[in-house]
Image (spheres, grey):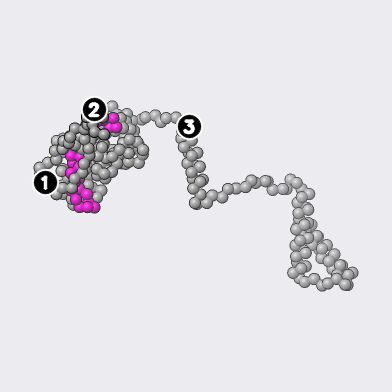
Amino acid sequence: MALLRAFCLAFLIAFSAFQVTDARAQRLSSSELLRQYLHARTAFLAERESAHPFNLLEFRGPETLYLPGDTMRVWLEGLQHQRLLAMLPEPIALFSIDDWEKISNLRSAAFEEVFDDTQWAFTGSNSRSSIDTMRTADLRSRFQTVFGAPTVTLVETPAPDSLQREQIVEFEYWFLLNDSVRVVVLDVNGPWDRGVVLAADQDYRAYLPVIKREFLEQLIPEADRTPFADYYYNIDQQTWYLTGFDGASFFDRRIERPDMSEGRPSPIRGPDPIPLDDPNEQE
């Protein structure tokens, strides 16, 4: 600090001497005097600092500034995340399905209280597995082959045409896995959607992917189709449908409000499909 003051004093003395000795010099304005002072001071400080190399600032490389709309960065980070996941070993299955039992409609009353009181955790059609990409009507026909008739349909639901949209469920299958794990499989959004909803006791929330993979995906995709018929109520159209599979094709027909007291509709049998190698098949 003393050195800086000495410099400033020397500068002022020299400048004053210059004005005295050179009477012909033009008188400087205060702003020009200040500019010359700052320029001389900066040069002095720069020369002083350069004489001490150990005082130089550490070099820092350029920094990347990320913008909120930088989709390329998000995509690259996603690729890196996938590469890291691919390097991880396969997770150890902590839940295995030893046996399963479907609750029939005749036995549903005995299990209704325990199923109604269950705190459920859900998983929907959020992957590209065969279960999630298959039409719900197609899945329903394969469920009919593997599990038989559903535990609950709209016929067993009181006043279904007065329910909210999320409460209208075409079919429900109730299961007990390993004699104790409560599981329900139900349609997503009627016969025109894809996939099903899988629900299990919330204590098994972490095992929902395992249950879906080891239970449904092991049994359903390779199963044959069996004819079935269900009632479905479209709340947007306020229209009832008879939907199902007749052995040859899927169908959905508009109908008047059915008489639920008559029970579930009987499966409709359509014409037998023509084998692909039938010599009489028309081209």
Q: Nearer the viewer, residue 39 or 152?
A: 152
Q: Which residues are magenta?
A: 219-244
Does residue 81 appear left or right of residue 235 in this picture? right
**Res 279 label:** 2
Question: Which quadrant holds the N terminus?
Answer: bottom right
Sequence-first tag of 1 and 3: 3
Neighbor class of circle 2 (other Cα within 10 Å; few <14, some 14-19, many 20+) is few
Sequence-first tag of 1 and 2: 1
Q: Quadrant of residue 278?
A: top left
Indicate the secondary structure of the residue bearing disc 1: loop
Neighbor class of circle 1 (other Cα within 10 Å; few <14, some 14-19, many 20+) is few
**Res 87 label:** 3
Does residue 8 appear left or right of residue 104 in this picture? right
The kind of residue tagged 3 is Met
Residue 213 point in image, percent of width and height: 33, 33
Q: Name the residue at 11% across, 46% down.
A: 259
Q: Nearer the viewer, residue 277 or 82?
A: 277
**Res 216 label:** none
Residue placed under numbered mark 1 in the picture: 259
Does residue 67 appear left or right of residue 93 in this picture? right
